[in-house]
């Protein structure tokens, strides 16, 4: 199971709408870039998206058109390979403040802009009829996965680490740090997430990726020799 979807390398200018050049961002502007974490009774955009993903209607592409807090790059999924579809967009993870982010360009056009570190790319992946996978990707390595996840869900959601200390997956270039969690939202079947780190190359500070599954990825956990 590869961890790189066709649209996962989408963190660029389109994702950073509303950001300002570092030299132009003042203290007041930076203070407005703080994204609030979930409250006792209210989830963030990602928390709502995972709740939808775990619902019966979340198996259908049309259910995501009006997903709260998500801006999609297109109105419908695109076929990137025969029988395989994906839809990408962006959201803001709760609990983050301002950070320097790449502008999505390379060479002499590369520059850093100020935005919220929680600005993330999101990708749905599946067949023509069924949404099978959900992936979220933010700038910067952040191995405190559990804390990030907890800030996206209400207090009633139970998040449990089920495996970590994994060997790198030989099928994808990653920096490692893989860990798996179970997310139990009240009234929903448990969701599972694999968190991992991905090298961003010369023009990126690297990425933290969260891949969500409807079923426990036991085969992957075993194949990666996680503990």
Image: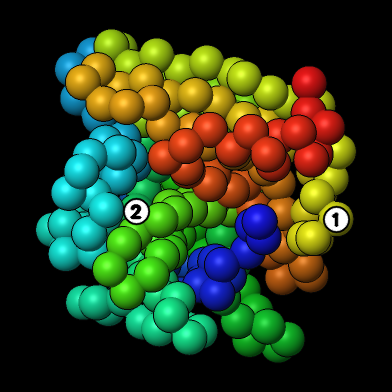
Q: Quadrant of residue 141?
A: top right
Q: Which residue is mark 1?
A: 170
Q: Quadrant of residue 128?
A: bottom left
- For this orientation, the residue located farthest to the left is 66
Q: How many marks?
A: 2
Residues at discs 2 and 1 in contact (Cβ within 8 Å)? no
In the image, residue 193 sits, relative to residue 185, either above or below, namely: below
Q: Which residue is mark 2?
A: 91
Q: Residue at x 22, y 39 (%)?
A: 55
Between 80 and 207, the one nearer to me in the picture: 80
For label 2, count other residues whose C-alpha is less than 10 Å away and answer few (under 14), some (14-19) or many (20+): many
Indicate left or right for 153 with 192 as reference: left
Indicate left or right for 92 with 165 as reference: left
Q: Is residue 32 visible in this depiction of the protein?
A: no
The disc label shown at residue 108, or none: none
Question: Residue 225, percent across and down?
Answer: 83, 32
Q: From the image, which quarter does the C terminus lie in?
A: top right
Q: Residue at x 27, y 53 (%)?
A: 59
For label 1, count other residues whose C-alpha is less than 10 Å away and answer few (under 14), some (14-19) or many (20+): few
Question: Residue 24, percent across and down?
Answer: 45, 64
Q: Is residue 110 visible in this depiction of the protein?
A: yes
In the image, residue 43 sits, relative to residue 220, either above or below, namely: above
């Amino acid at each position: 199971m590869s961890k790189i979807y066709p649209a996962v390398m989408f963190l660029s200018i389109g994702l950073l709408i509303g950001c300002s050049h570092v030299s132009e961002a003042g203290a007041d502007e930076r203070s407005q870039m703080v994204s609030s974490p979930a409250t006792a009774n209210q989830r963030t955009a990602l928390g709502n998206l995972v709740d939808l993903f775990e619902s019966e209607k979340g198996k259908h592409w049309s259910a995501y058109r009006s997903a709260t807090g998500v801006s999609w790059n297109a109105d419908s999924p695109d076929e990137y390979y025969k029988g395989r579809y994906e839809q990408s967009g962006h959201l803001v993870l709760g609990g983050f403040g301002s950070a320097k982010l790449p502008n999505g360009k390379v060479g002499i056009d590369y520059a850093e802009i100020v935005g919220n570190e929680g600005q993330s790319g999101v990708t749905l992946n599946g067949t023509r009829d069924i949404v099978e996978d959900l992936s979220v990707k933010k700038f910067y390595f952040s191995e405190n996965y559990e804390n990030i996840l907890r800030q996206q869900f209400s207090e009633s959601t139970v998040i449990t680490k089920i495996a970590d200390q994994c060997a790198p997956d030989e099928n994808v270039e990653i920096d490692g740090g893989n860990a798996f969690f179970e997310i139990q939202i009240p009234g929903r079947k448990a969701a599972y997430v694999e968190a991992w780190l991905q090298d961003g190359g010369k023009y990126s500070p690297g990425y933290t990726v969260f891949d969500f599954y409807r079923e426990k990825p036991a085969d992957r956990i075993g194949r990666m020799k996680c503990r």
